């Protein structure tokens, strides 16, 4: 694989003591291109502009999918990525829905490893910090006919990050806008799913919330996701979370938390959850916790949810399931706790 190193690193401009989420980009990218039925072996090169002009296919027809994952500085100074092959597989599931050709998993893994090795100084050392990794795939032909792209590009950009939302959030039960429909693309990490959600989120923010709780597209009776995270409730000691469907994104954080629940003997129910059931549990005091689950924030505790001008409060116990999950996942990710599920992928540093 070709590696072209920058001669002008930007790392000295980064304030590692005050990292935001997803704004500063590291020095290099990985890029591989698909044409005539083949992916090339890829290359690491300095971050920079694309070569295509404004007829770039993905900009017009949205054949674009992405991933979000993190590399963690280990207690021994090494670097490891959490469950990267699961991201590679999900990228291909998302891509298949958008008619994007399959990306070989080894190309994904080799690209990630090579890029992290080149930009290893960008993996921060601070508490709860990480290098956020953004692999993405998009149609990169230049034409404006409404048909699938012929060429595709796989890219990875990375960004040193602190942790997103640390404070408990107030969420709005969203019953006007819909994130995903049956037969649609909700299960895919398709770029347009985010574009389509921004307006609902902004309206919620204008109404005094930080996020939306998405409900189903039929009658807005069932909870589906929390913003760009999966959602879980703890009711009478049981963790309940919506069952996966083509409207729900299969989060790797969700899957990891469900696995830890099994390890720890916490009962789990994956099933449809009605808004009414959660309101009742809140009123009767049986709702013990509610939280979002996703790579960016790990767990994001919900302190209240609002519907029909009423606000229902949710406890945020300091030693609750959300807090214990966040701590356990952090310990595994930074190498402080045994990785009994083989989740961590060590990056070879040259
Ligand atoms: C990415 C994403 C998630 C969380 O997935 P993780 O693999 O846990 O990061 C959940 N819901 C939506 C809509 C997402 O895009």
Image (spheres, grey):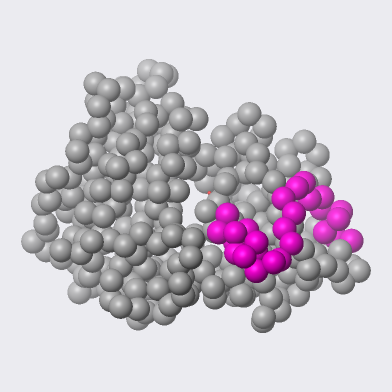
Is residue 183 one of those drawn in magenta? Answer: no
Quadrant holding the C terminus: bottom left
User: Front-most of 257 and 185?
Assistant: 257
Q: Which residue corresponds to the image point at 18% horizontal and 50% vertical from the top-left? A: 44
* Residue 233 in view: no
Q: Is residue 330 above or below residue 93?
A: below
Start and end of the magenta stretch? 255-280
Q: Which residue corresponds to the image point at 29% horizontal and 52% vertical from the top-left? A: 112
Q: Quadrant of residue 205?
A: bottom right
Q: Which residue corresponds to the image point at 57% horizontal and 47% vertical from the top-left? A: 250
User: Front-most of 343 and 193?
Assistant: 343
Q: Is residue 235 left or right of residue 127?
A: right
Q: Is residue 340 above or below residue 183?
A: below
Q: Quadrant of residue 314?
A: bottom right
Q: Main secondary structure of the magenta part?
A: helix
Q: Position of residue 297 (x, y in %)?
A: 52, 65
Q: Is residue 133 above or below residue 247?
A: below
Q: Is residue 253 left or right of residue 113?
A: right
* Residue 289 in view: yes
User: Front-most of 233 and 58?
Assistant: 233
Q: Position of residue 117 (x, y in %)?
A: 21, 61
């Amino acid at each position: 694989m070709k590696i072209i190193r920058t001669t002008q690193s930007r790392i000295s401009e980064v304030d590692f003591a005050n990292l935001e989420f997803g704004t500063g980009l590291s020095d290099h990218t990985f890029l591989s291109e698909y044409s005539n039925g083949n992916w090339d072996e890829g290359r690491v090169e300095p971050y920079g502009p694309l070569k295509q002009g404004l007829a770039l296919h993905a900009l017009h027809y949205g054949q674009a999918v992405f991933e979000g994952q993190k590399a963690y500085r280990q207690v021994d100074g090494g670097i490891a990525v959490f469950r990267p092959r699961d991201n590679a597989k999900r990228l291909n599931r998302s891509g298949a829905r958008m008619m994007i050709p399959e990306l070989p998993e080894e190309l994904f893994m080799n690209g990630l490893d090579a890029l992290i090795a080149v930009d290893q100084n960008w993996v921060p050392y601070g508490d709860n910090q990480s290098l956020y990794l953004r692999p993405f795939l998009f149609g990169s032909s230049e034409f404006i006919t409404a048909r699938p792209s012929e060429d595709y590009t796989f890219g990875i950009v990375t960004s040193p990050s602190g942790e997103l939302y640390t404070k408990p959030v107030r969420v709005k039960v969203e019953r006007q806008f819909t994130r995903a429909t049956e037969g649609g693309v909700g299960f895919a990490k398709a770029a347009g799913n985010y574009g389509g959600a921004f307006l609902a989120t902004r309206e919620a923010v204008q109404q005094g919330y930080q996020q939306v709780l998405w409900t189903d597209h039929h009658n807005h009776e069932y909870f589906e996701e929390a913003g760009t995270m999966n959602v879980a409730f703890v009711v009478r000691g049981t963790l309940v979370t919506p069952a996966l469907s083509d409207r729900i994104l299969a989060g790797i954080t969700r899957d990891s938390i469900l696995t830890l629940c099994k390890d720890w003997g916490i009962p789990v129910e994956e099933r449809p959850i009605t808004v009414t059931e959660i309101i009742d549990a809140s009123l009767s005091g049986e709702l013990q916790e509610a939280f979002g689950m996703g790579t960016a924030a790990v767990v994001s505790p919900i302190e209240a949810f609002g519907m029909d001008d009423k606000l229902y409060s949710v406890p945020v116990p300091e030693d609750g399931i959300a807090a214990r999950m966040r701590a356990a996942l952090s310990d595994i990710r930074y190498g402080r706790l045994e990785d009994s599920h083989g989740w961590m992928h060590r990056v070879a540093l040259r």
